[in-house]
Amino acid sequence: MKNYPRHLDLQPAMHAQGTVKLPGSKSISNRTLLLAAIAHGTTHISDLLASDDTHVMLMALQKLGIKWEQIGESQDYIVHGTDGRLPVYHADLFLGNAGTAIRPLTAALAVIGGDYTLHGVARMHERPIGDLVDALNAIGTRIEYTGTPGFPPLHIRRGLIQKHRMQVRGNVSSQFLTAILMAAPLMAKEEDVTIDVVGDLISKPYIEITLNLMHRFGVDVVRDGWKSFTVQAGQRYLSPDTIHVEGDASSASYFLAAGAIAGGPVRVEGVGKDSIQGDVRFVEALQKMGADITMGDNWIEAKSNGVLKAIDTDFNHIPDAAMTIAVAALYADGASVLRNIGSWRVKETDRIAAMATELRKLGATVEEGEDFLRITPPAQIQPAAIDTYDDHRMAMCFSLASLDGAARRGNKIRINDPKCVAKTFPDYFTSFSSIVGNNLF
Ligand SMILES: O=C(O)C1=C[C@@H](OP(=O)(O)O)[C@@H](O)[C@H](O)C1
Ligand SMILES: C=C(OP(=O)(O)O)C(=O)O
């Protein structure tokens, strides 16, 4: 669905069943684009995600002088790597609200050096980046804030890297460590680069995605658990020639939850048991709630198995897919608790506050803590107009409240401003309506 109306009305749906082909993973797409750009050689990327977040990355790379081509109308791209050099020294980059674009680009551009400004939508300028800037400037880069200290917009100038051991905090976003890891080979020409993580690290599985992709581009990282990471001198990124982008595991969560709530089976294609994305572990939470899950190499299927069970679970490892569980909790047999989700407060919106407000509209009783939510389902889900706060995941996960579950029925759900799904999944509502028998009106 390309032209979204101002709101979408979803009719109650008795059953969810069918197969959905997933769009490419956002996390893999944006990492692969950047690595292909700074690698030696040409990379053919297949099934890249088509969305706002990848669009801003592609446009930024183009402005930096990286040559890439889209093959026809397909989602296959060819990126001509520049071996760590950037043809354009002076550029102004708009990065929307894409954390996976602004954070890795900040580190790469600061290390390479030049005269670059990086900015985004208003919410991007409220999303912290101070821990990344502090870590980089402490070794000699020159990143300045042009607005509020600690937040984009940023102005990057040419610095001089003087140290090769650095520290980064990882308790606000794992993307800071990801950004530094990806930039590390650019400064490990003659000396090893070691990155020490200070304090707790959140969202750990995203670091595994980073290390996996760096490995495919020829760079191996020596690690001491989650505490310290070393890129040994002399390694440089080499194109693996071709890279296929897996389907997005976070996007899979909505369809799998639909199968678990409303009968199923619902199958997603493009991601499976060998996925490198941590969000495939979303199925463990669904299983804990009682759903039936089966997995193949490149697919996952969910079907319901009676009333969903309430769960009390730590979701630090899957912060994005956890939002889907918050809505699935409406169908459970008691109160569910989502713990250790403090990072929700600094994402596309304050997701803890937004989730609590919108779940209450549906009749749920919600207790909101600094880093947790306790959700008690209502006797009956109420019809509601859901505000989406320019947050794609709010729009996508609340579509599930239109489904009938074994314990209680769904209801008419209005999704306000549905176009925000374009951040990661422009065709979400077309795919959703295909598994519920076109409940859009
Ligand atoms: O590295 C990544 O691709 C991501 C890391 C996570 O962010 P945090 O590390 O900020 O939790 C996740 O929420 C985001 O959607 C994608
Ligand atoms: C937090 C998210 O995005 P970002 O990559 O901008 O951090 C998300 O997609 O849920």
Image (spheres, grey):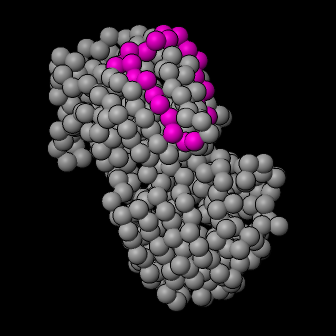
Q: Which residues are magenta?
A: 74-96
Identity of the residue drawn at 34% across and 19% down: 83
Identity of the residue drawn at 64% across and 71% down: 435
Identity of the residue drawn at 24% across and 33% down: 219
Up-down relation of residue 364 to residue 214 (above or below): below
> Toward the viewer: 153 or 392?
392
Q: Position of residue 311 (x, y in %)?
A: 45, 77
Q: Position of residue 379 (x, y in %)?
A: 67, 86
Find the residue positioned furthest to the front: 72
> Toward the viewer: 307 or 247?
247
Please indicate, yes or no, whether residue 45 appears anywhere in the rendered image: yes
Up-down relation of residue 68 to residue 55 (above or below): above
Please indicate, yes or no, whether residue 182 appears anywhere in the rendered image: no
> Toward the viewer: 5 or 339?
5
| Residue 39 position by quadrant | top left
Horizontal side of 60 relative to 296 (left or right) equals right
